[in-house]
Amino acid sequence: GAGVSQTPSNKVTEKGKYVELRCDPISGHTALYWYRQSLGQGPEFLIYFQGTGAADDSGLPNDRFFAVRPEGSVSTLKIQRTERGDSAVYLCASSQSGNYQETQYFGPGTRLLVL
Amino acid sequence: AQSVTQPDIHITVSEGASLELRCNYSYGATPYLFWYVQSPGQGLQLLLKYFSGDTLVQGIKGFEAEFKRSQSSFNLRKPSVHWSDAAEYFCAVVPYTGGFKTIFGAGTRLFVKA
């Protein structure tokens, strides 16, 4: 079956602009995760959804970052007033029900470049 | 401070040689432990995981890892490396606090020479 997909694959924007990054999880997976991976670093947890609700958003760096999952499937990560430091690869993952023992399946990521 | 440490930024091994990638963690209680691989152009893929029980766990692609509580380590091994194993490897933990946050190490890049 289809894996986790993310769009766009690349996004170039200017400092101060607003961007939206989309994640389409594996069908039927109720748990969805967003991570940010800066160059030379491991992925950094941002937020975890269980269904439509954000169960843990402790990794969001500040109030410029926001994520939604209105129907419990597709999720959108929104970044307002982008800064050059937001440049990174944004990864999305999903798992069947959010049990920590489950495998998280990762998408290919969206590479964001803020000029 | 709670952390996951991968001491080696990069490692080079010859094809056919054995491999060991190091991972140490610093948490009050033993967390849940994972190894992931990230190949160019591909997403992160889970190699193996440890929750409890037998301290030697087998994973995909011929990898194994050994949990050593006394050393707070979870090192990844492979007896014979193939050129296709060249990739970035990440150790990760889910702290035993009931949450779902996965904490990743900074990664070790593996180079394989012919």
Image: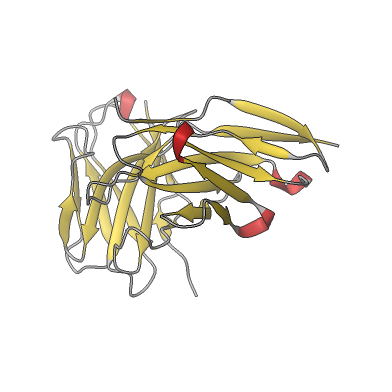
| Nearer to me, B108 or A27 | B108
Displayed quadrant of residue B89 = top right
Q: Position of residue A8 (x, y in %)?
A: 41, 51
Q: Position of residue A40 (x, y in %)?
A: 49, 28
On screen, residue B51 above or below B69: below
Q: Position of residue A114 (x, y in %)?
A: 35, 29
Say if residue B72 shows up in the picture: no
On screen, residue B84 above or below A98: above
Say if residue B4 shows up in the picture: yes
Q: Quadrant of the N terminus of chain B?
A: top left
| Nearer to me, A111 or B5 | B5
Q: Position of residue A102 (x, y in %)?
A: 39, 63
Seen at 48% across and 54% down, the residue is B49
Displayed quadrant of residue A57 = top left
Left or right placement of residue B9 versus residue A6 in this view: right
Q: Quadrant of the C terminus of chain B?
A: top right
Report the coloring of the rendering.
secondary structure
Left or right placement of residue A52 versus residue B74 in this view: left
